Image (cartoon, rainbow, N blue to C red):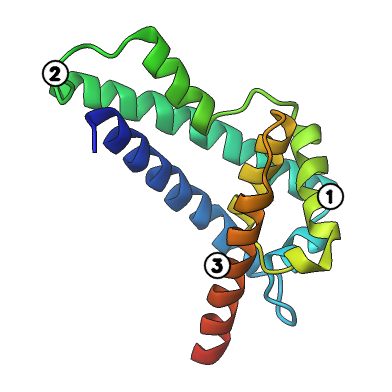
């Protein structure tokens, strides 16, 4: 694994952990159906916009702080090019309009097959779809993973 690949992996994990805290707080409002689709549907438009705005701001701040940290530590043997940094930013941050991402996420959750797709996965896929990327493979994996997590959580209750 190259230093750039390691950096991207650490950055994505940091973002997912940050987003999971926000989702855990929002999930307290749901008692009957614990799927992320139910969580999303239970939120008002302002709540949905708040989740997406938090995601966007969190990813941007994480990107900035992580790049500052890694560059300052001298982890990279050479200074990453502006192109490398732009590719990292493109992977983790979106400048898409908040309402557009809300709509894309809502559209994913309209399909009952996506009921257990984890919310941050749905957000990533909505953004990828907005960028024109094919998300079918990603969606299949997210459905399977989300269902397994849901079954595991249900078994622990």
Vertical position of residue 53 compared to residue 22: above or below = above
Q: Quadrant of residue 8?
A: top left
Q: Is residue 107 left or right of residue 122?
A: right
Q: State the mark number for residue 77.
A: 2
Q: Quadrant of residue 133?
A: top right
Q: Quadrant of residue 128?
A: top right
Q: State the mark number for residue 145.
A: 3
In space, the residues marked 3 and 2 are separated at their CA atoms by 36 Å
Q: Secondary structure at mark 2?
A: loop
Of the pair 107 and 22, the residue shown nearer to us? 107
Q: Is residue 38 left or right of residue 93?
A: right
In space, the residues marked 2 and 1 are separated at their CA atoms by 43 Å
Q: Residues within 10 Å of mark 1 (few under 14, many from 20)?
A: few
Look at 60% across and 51% down and name the residue there.
138
Q: Residues within 10 Å of mark 3 (few under 14, many from 20)?
A: some
Look at 80% across and 33% down and name the residue there.
100
In space, the residues marked 1 and 3 are separated at their CA atoms by 19 Å
Whichever of labels 2 and 1 marks the residue nearer the N terminus, that label is 2
Vertical position of residue 4 compared to residue 43: above or below = above
Q: From the top left corner, tell me how far across and down residue 33 is, in percent.
A: 74, 78
Look at 81% across and 50% down and name the residue there.
106
Whichever of labels 1 and 3 marks the residue nearer the N terminus, that label is 1
The quadrant of the image that shows the C terminus is bottom right
Of the pair 60 and 121, the residue shown nearer to us? 121
Q: Secondary structure at mark 1?
A: helix
Whichever of labels 3 and 2 marks the residue nearer the N terminus, that label is 2
Q: From the top left corner, tell me how far across and down residue 23 is, in percent.
A: 58, 58
From the image, tell me which residue sits under label 1. Answer: 107
Look at 86% across and 58% down and name the residue there.
110
């Amino acid at each position: 694994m190259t230093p750039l690949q390691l950096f991207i992996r650490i950055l994505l994990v940091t973002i997912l952990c940050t987003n999971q805290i926000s989702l855990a707080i929002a999930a307290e409002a749901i008692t009957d159906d614990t799927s992320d689709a139910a969580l999303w549907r239970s939120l008002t438009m302002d709540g949905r916009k708040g989740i997406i705005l938090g995601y966007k701001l969190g990813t941007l701040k994480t990107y900035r702080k992580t790049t500052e940290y890694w560059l300052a530590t001298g982890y990279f043997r050479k200074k990453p090019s502006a192109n490398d940094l732009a590719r990292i930013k493109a992977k983790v941050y979106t400048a898409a309009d908040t309402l557009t991402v809300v709509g894309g996420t809502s559209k994913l959750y309209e399909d009952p097959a996506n009921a257990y797709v984890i919310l941050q996965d749905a957000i990533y896929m909505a953004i990828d779809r907005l960028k024109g990327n094919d998300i079918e493979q990603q969606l299949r994996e997210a459905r399977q993973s989300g269902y397994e997590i849901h079954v595991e959580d249900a078994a622990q209750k």
